[in-house]
Amino acid sequence: MTEFRPGRFQILPTIIKNLLIINVLIFFAQYVFSKAGFSLEDYFALHTFQSPLFKPWQFLTHMFMHGSLEHIFFNMFALWMFGSILENVWGPKRFLTFYLISGFGAALLHMIVLYFNAQGMLTDYHSVNSANDAMAFLTKYPPERQFRTDDLTTILNTTLQDHLNEATLGASGAVFGCLAAFGYLFPNTYIYLYFFLPIKAKWFVIGYAALELYSAVQNSAGDNVAHFAHLGGALAGFLMVYFWNKTNKKTFY
């Protein structure tokens, strides 16, 4: 059987319910603290190893933070949509393990990419020896703020720190792990794009992963989506469900 047909199905199983509550509460805390002039993202969102803001616990805490109402809504909707089915099939303990490892896998691949990007930027920064070099650096790494000074050294140093201190946050990586697992376990179950267009889960997952890979390689200016984190979460989720089912290939839904 290659289509999911629920038996005793909980609409809101335990882990999914608690993840939704935790994410919403933390998002509210982010809003409250930001109004007070304090950034939780500096301490709990994920930062590259070269950033002075990096802390080891961010590999976990970044999964529970979001950048906007739209960001948290779509992540939580996808988590409920795909994660609730997986938790019903696996049970709460296995699902929570799967969710966290998918998130860690997403963070790990993203951090590797961030590390090499930051090393390239630092190399370019240390190669600046003239005003022309500084302008070339600022063209390659555009400033993220408006400056009220013409001092190139200040602009250069501030721009470098701004890029190094960029925060990565969101449950997207772990959610992509859930999506990959759903597509692997229930390949012929239909997903309705925009609640209208039906597409089988396996083609949806493959197509979405291909789009993320293309976007990651393109690395378009102004694109602040962590595509490699999505791919890392999907890869970690796929590998886990593959090995969990390696000796049980005939029981796919």
Image (cartoon, rainbow, N blue to C red):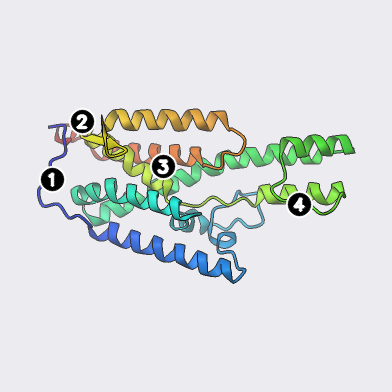
Which callout, 3 or 4, points at the residue further toward the start of the chain?
A: 4
Residue found at the far bottom of this picture: 36
Which callout, 1 or 2, points at the residue further toward the start of the chain?
A: 1
Q: From the viewer's perspective, is the residue at label 3 or at label 2 nearer?
A: 2
User: Dot 3: few (<14), some (14–19), or many (≥20) neighbours within 10 Å?
Assistant: many
Q: Name the residue under label 4.
A: 158
Q: Distance between the residues labelled 2 and 4?
A: 51 Å
Horizontal side of residue 86 vs 70, given as left or right: left
Q: Mark 1 points at which residue?
A: 6
Report the disc number at residue 233. Answer: 3
Q: The C terminus lies in which quarter of the figure?
A: top left
In the image, residue 19 sits, relative to residue 253, either above or below, namely: below
Where is residue 99 drawn, in percent x and y? 35, 50
Which callout, 4 or 1, points at the residue further toward the start of the chain?
A: 1
Q: How far apart are marks 3 and 4 (CA)?
A: 32 Å
Which callout, 3 or 2, points at the residue further toward the start of the chain?
A: 2
Q: Name the residue under label 2.
A: 188
Report the disc number at residue 175. Answer: none
Q: Distance between the residues labelled 1 and 2?
A: 14 Å
Q: Quadrant of residue 210?
A: top left
Question: Which of 251 and 40 lies nearest the eye of the viewer?
Answer: 40
Where is residue 218 drawn, in percent x and y? 56, 28
Q: From the viewer's perspective, is the residue at label 3 or at label 4 nearer?
A: 4
| Tag 4 secondary structure | helix
| Tag 3 secondary structure | helix
